[in-house]
Image (cartoon, rainbow, N blue to C red):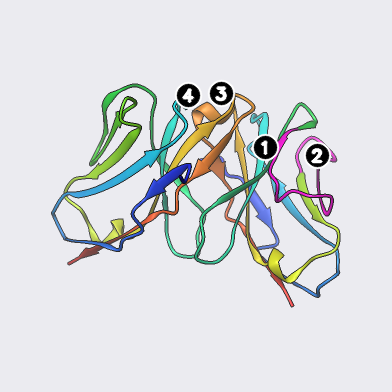
Amino acid sequence: EPEVTQTPSHQVTQMGQEVILRCVPISNHLYFYWYRQILGQKVEFLVSFYNNEISEKSEIFDDQFSVERPDGSNFTLKIRSTKLEDSAMYFCASSEQGVAYGYTFGSGTRLTVV
Amino acid sequence: QKEVEQNSGPLSVPEGAIASLNCTYSDRVSQSFFWYRQYSGKSPELIMSIYSNGDKEDGRFTAQLNKASQYVSLLIRDSQPSDSATYLCAVNKGSNQGGKLIFGQGTELSVKP
């Protein structure tokens, strides 16, 4: 069964450092998303991406965050200057036809900011 | 009012029993509703989607939707210990293509052998 692949599975970074989280969506999917889940809390929407541009972003997704689809397969989330409160599990998701049909989530990257 | 609300649990049922999980949502224009299962430390896994009022069955799972009451539920028949997980209710917000899913806090289910 097709999978959404995320790397790395766990990243530890120092506060103030830049991190890039990587995702390979399912190949025929057109809609891409990033969500995060702080330990013990709910899954929160960060950003959606379609046709090489951001469709929607949440209040969490401020100027420190950016997304990119640098080639035909990768979808990345960059955090420019990490804060302690950025520590969370970050999930990439993709969908063939959009949110109405549900997402397939990747296995996640656990980001720990120290 | 929270956009998607679930009882956090834990809900404990014996093996073989029916587990009933409930969810309410606030946005009346939402059209798509989902149940995800999340094992501890893992990513959410889609188990059911429902779009119309009434029941939708898939194996041991039945999703129920009542748009007038803004209520979604998930029934798990013949519960197994492997069903022990957190169940997330998710509702779409925005357009069917460009919108997003809003998740509830999740209900922790524990199935005792």
Label number found at residue B29: 4
Same chain for mark 2 and mark 1? The answer is: yes
Which segment did they paint magenta?
A55-74
Could you tell me residue B88's position as x and y percent? 42, 49
Chain ID, mark 1: A
Do callouts 1 and 3 mark residues in contact (Cβ within 8 Å)?
A: no
Among the two numbered marks 4 and 3 on one chain, the one whose residue lies closer to the N terminus = 4
Type of amino acid under label 3: Asn
Residue type at numbered disc 4: Val
Query: Badges 2 and 1: C-beta atoms under 8 Å apart?
Result: yes
Q: Which residue is mark 2?
A: A69
Element at badge 4? Answer: loop
Image point (57%, 44%), residue name: A3
Magenta segment includes A64: yes
Element at badge 1?
strand
**Structural crowding at the residue carrying mark 1, measured as other residues with C-alpha within 10 Å and reported as few (<14), some (14–19) or many (≥20):** many
Q: Are marks 3 and 2 on the same chain?
A: no
The chain holding disc 2 is A
Name the residue carrying label 3: B96
Q: Are marks 1 and 3 on the same chain?
A: no
Q: Which residue is mark 1?
A: A32
Which secondary structure class fits the magenta region best?
Answer: loop
Of badges 3 and 2, nearer the viewer stands 3
